[in-house]
Image (tube, rainbow, N blue to C red):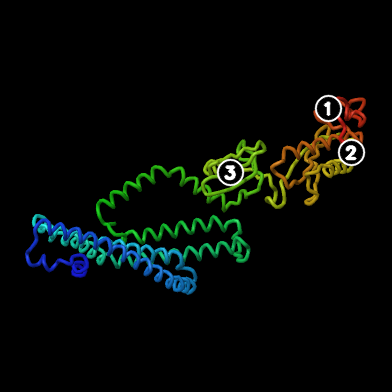
């Protein structure tokens, strides 16, 4: 390479070898060398572009075939990116070699800098030699790490495929619910990655050095001190997931907070309240308290809404049941399937307590549904002339305490438009 560069860049090299090298002649050599280096750099740049385009074009088909043969374990795009990176690295080495040879020739033209030119080769080759020896020593470890990365990536794909099939219902395992698939996939993938890191640690170059051990110890202390709360939330999230206390879309009451479950992760649970507020609760806090799931049978069946009235013993209980079911049928957001039902919960001294239970598919509007249901209950009992014994009456009134239909829309109330 140097002989070629001397032949191209220095036509007067023969005269230089004869010992005729005054300062002006060395300056001429330097100018010719720089000019020749620029010309050679332009030519090499154009040739390299054509060579790179040809290599990339031929490699695309081979990379795609390799992707199909390995069942997408090795993808074409990362391989092509690696190839482009290596080509750019080789181009950089070529430019550095050209720069080094140009600099060495330039320094060799002058008497004062000629000893320095002889040392440049050692300065460049010694680090490359040390790097080559280190690479040769670490090559088996690097190959093991490469195999470990490929195997771990393939296992992660298998885990993702299996749990995705379970979540979609295509693969069924007795006692394993589909809503467990996503958290189980995350936990299994995390444990696999941790195991792979533990296996790979001794094979990482420099892992046995004191500096590497010090950094690892420092990071371990930071993680142990700063992740205590996060780990407790993760453990609580796992327990709540497999307890199936609630699912996304359920109406729940956690402590004093009531809302619809928007999302449930390993760290937190998010609720959407009737006041358009999104509340985030740590899973450790939820596990320490109690959870009331108001969505009976899950979000697919609907949320259960309950209201109660007390009616005297002189009113037939069958008539009370019919009136309550009539009120439920007149409430727009109450589902008729599952059908509403009435329970007689208590027999007091002066009245019977009837409990009306209905379902709604809009748990986020539960307060509005309950309000409309209570209004229809009052209207139905007034329409049929039956007195509601709430608040309690210890002495029976001479006349039933009712609101006749003609007074339902007394000012300022206005009747609905028909």
> The N terminus appears in which quarter of the rendering?
bottom left
Please name which of the two marks, 1 or 3, marks the residue nearer to the observer: 3
Please name which of the two marks, 2 or 3, marks the residue nearer to the observer: 2
Q: Residues within 10 Å of mark 2 (few under 14, many from 20)?
A: few
3D distance between C-alphas at marks 2 and 3? 42 Å
161 to the left or right of 413:
left
**Nearest to N terminus: mark 1 or mark 3:** 3
Instruction: Return the x and y of residue 192 as percentages of the image width and height.
Output: 44, 60
Q: Nearer the viewer, residue 16 or 274?
A: 16
Please name which of the two marks, 2 or 1, marks the residue nearer to the observer: 2
Label 3 belongs to which residue?
270
3D distance between C-alphas at marks 1 and 3? 44 Å
Label 1 belongs to which residue?
393
Element on which disc 2 rests: loop
Position above or below: 253 against 146? above
Element on which disc 1 rests: loop
3D distance between C-alphas at marks 2 and 1? 38 Å
Label 2 belongs to which residue?
418
Q: Can residue 173 be seen at all in this image of the molecule? A: yes
Q: Can residue 93 be seen at all in this image of the molecule? A: no
Q: Given contact means CB atoms under 8 Å apart, are the residues at marks 1 and 3 in contact?
A: no
Q: Residues within 10 Å of mark 3 (few under 14, many from 20)?
A: some
Tag shown at residue 22 = none
Position above or below: 346 against 58? above
Q: Given contact means CB atoms under 8 Å apart, are the residues at marks 2 and 3 in contact?
A: no
Position above or below: 79 against 211? below
Q: Across the whole image, how many numbered discs are drawn on residues?
A: 3
Element on which disc 3 rests: strand
Instruction: Return the x and y of residue 143 as percentages of the image width and height.
Output: 33, 67
Q: Nearer the viewer, residue 418 or 253?
A: 418
**Nearest to N terminus: mark 2 or mark 1:** 1
């Amino acid at each position: 390479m140097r002989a070629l560069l001397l032949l191209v860049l220095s036509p007067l090299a023969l005269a230089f070898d004869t010992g005729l090298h005054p300062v002006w002649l060395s300056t001429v050599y330097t100018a010719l060398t720089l000019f020749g280096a620029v010309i050679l750099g332009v030519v090499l740049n154009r040739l390299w572009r054509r060579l790179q385009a040809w290599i990339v074009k031929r490699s695309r088909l081979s990379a795609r075939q390799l992707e199909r043969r390995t069942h997408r374990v090795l993808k074409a795009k990362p391989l092509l990116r690696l190839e482009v990176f290596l080509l750019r690295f080789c181009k950089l080495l070529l430019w550095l070699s050209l720069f080094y040879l140009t600099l060495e020739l330039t320094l060799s033209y002058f008497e004062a800098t000629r000893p320095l030119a002889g040392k440049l080769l050692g300065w460049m080759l010694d680090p490359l030699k040390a790097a080559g020896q280190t690479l040769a020593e670490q090559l088996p470890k690097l190959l093991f790490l490469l195999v470990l990365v490929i195997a771990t990536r393939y296992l992660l794909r298998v885990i993702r495929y299996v749990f995705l099939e379970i979540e979609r219902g295509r693969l069924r395992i007795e006692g394993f619910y589909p809503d467990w698939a996503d958290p189980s996939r995350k936990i299994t993938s995390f444990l696999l990655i941790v195991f792979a890191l533990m296996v790979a640690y001794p094979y990482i170059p420099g892992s046995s050095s004191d500096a590497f051990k010090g950094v690892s110890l420092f990071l371990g202390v930071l993680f142990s001190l700063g992740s205590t709360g996060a780990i407790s939330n993760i453990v609580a999230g796992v327990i709540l997931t497999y307890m199936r206390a609630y699912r996304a879309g359920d109406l729940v009451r956690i402590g004093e907070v009531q809302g619809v479950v928007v999302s449930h992760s390993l760290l937190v649970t998010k609720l959407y309240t009737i006041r358009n507020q999104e509340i985030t609760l740590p899973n450790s806090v939820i596990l320490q308290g109690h959870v009331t799931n108001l969505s009976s049978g899950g979000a697919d069946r609907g949320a259960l809404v309950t209201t109660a009235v007390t009616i005297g013993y002189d009113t037939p209980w069958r008539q009370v049941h019919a009136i309550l079911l009539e009120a439920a049928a007149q409430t727009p957001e109450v589902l008729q399937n599952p059908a509403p039902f009435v329970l007689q919960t208590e027999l007091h001294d002066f009245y019977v307590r009837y409990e009306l239970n209905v379902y709604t598919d809009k748990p986020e509007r539960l307060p509005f549904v309950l309000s409309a249901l209570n209004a229809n209950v009052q209207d139905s009992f007034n329409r049929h002339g039956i007195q509601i014994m709430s608040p309690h009456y210890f002495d029976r009134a001479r006349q039933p305490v009712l609101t006749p239909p003609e007074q339902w829309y007394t000012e300022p109330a206005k009747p609905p438009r028909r």
